[in-house]
Amino acid sequence: MSKEPETVEAVVRACRILQAFQPHETLTLGHVVERTGLSKTTSFRLLQSLIKGGLLERASKGAYRSTVQLLNVSRYTIGFASQATDSEFCQDLSMSLQRAAERQNVRLVTVNNNYSPKIALRNADLLIREGVHLVLEFQTYEHIAPIISSKFLEAQIPVIAIEIPHPGATYFGADNYQAGVIAGSALGRWAKANWKGKVDEILLLELPIAGSLPQLRITGALAGLSQALPDLDTRKAIHLDCKGTFEHSLDLVRTHLRRNPAKRTLVTTVNDPTALGALRAFEEAGRLDYCAVMGHNATRAAREELRRPGTRLIGSVGYFPERYGEELLSLALSILQKKPVPSAVFIKHQLITPRNVSLLYPLKTEGAGQFSAP
């Protein structure tokens, strides 16, 4: 994501530090890190600079207080529990949300769940202590969703669950079944056009730990394949738990290919890292011509692959997390203002292919060499 040329990033970060303080409030370095999402080192340096500039003061050993009265103090404080900070999807979502919060004059308290059930539960307690008015919860593990929901329900804090449903929360994110249908239909059409509909094998790269809703991407894909290829027996599809990662997908598909002869194989997945891992395995085995692969999320790495001549990544269903912020904040404010809202808000999907990838994501906006590794 490119920065606006007229902005100075250090100043923007310093503003985030100042906005973390409520009037007459004392914060430790740890509190500042939690509220801003900045690293400990960056936060410490900015705190010292703001003290030197007279905008902060030391309240006690290891604690700070703002000397500035900010205008337009936010009426609402919203907690955002991010799934992680190292994934492209989460980074795009977080940046989009931060921009929307600044425009809406909403104070955003961000914490990192770091793909950990234990940390997600601890962060729920932290956000309750912070006194947030609403929580945007993004965490992977379905089995702790009821526990997290009960914590916020007891604290009378409404929740918007991003991508993974939580009991009693408003859902925001993918229409996973429909996204799967889009993926499966596209794979089926490709097989009909290029293999005359003759398919020997279907590989399904899944993520069971995320629960039933993301699994609908696979269910929908099988439905889409059946629509495009009515004679294809999808009941014999091979299910592989690839943990949602490039590395697991690469290893499992490698093993599968070693044990089986070359077959015309359609591969549908839950995300792009698993799609790219499968693609790499077929390439290493010298069987690239025997596969057609479909991904989800249209990440930068997938978009780069779609631009490669002759790629066997047929497409990736776009979710556009870089657009989530405005819709999420609008939904959150409607809930806080007691306006009627639907129980689920689905984002719009679009199939990204080699033909349209540069129309939807022009190279000049992505930056040469800025694609993320899978």
Image (spheres, rainbow, N blue to C red):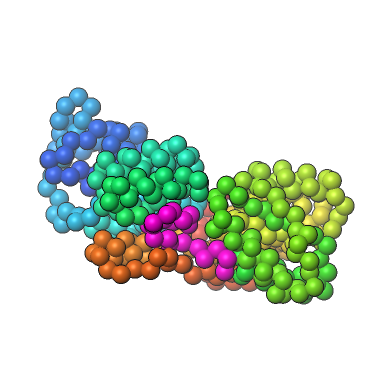
Residue at 74% of width from left, 48% of height from top?
253
Give above or below for 96 relative to 16.
below
Residue at 32% of width from left, 40% of height from top?
126
Give above or below for 30 relative to 317.
above
Q: In the rendered image, is residue 222 in sight?
A: yes
Location of the N terminus by quadrant is: bottom left
Rendering coords of residue 82 (x, y %): 42, 48
Rendering coords of residue 87 (x, y %): 50, 48
Among the 4 quarters of the image, the one containing residue 131: top left
Give above or below for 318 relative to 9.
below
Residue at 46% of width from left, 56% of height from top?
165
Give above or below for 192 relative to 167.
below
Q: Nearer the viewer, residue 300 or 362?
A: 300
* Magenta residue check for 49: no
Rendering coords of residue 190 (x, y %): 73, 71
Q: In the rendered image, is residue 38 in sight?
A: no
Left or right, residue 199 beside residue 74? right
Among the 4 quarters of the image, the one containing residue 100: bottom left
Among the 4 quarters of the image, the one containing residue 51: top left
- Residue most extreme to the top: 61
* Magenta-colored span: 160-178
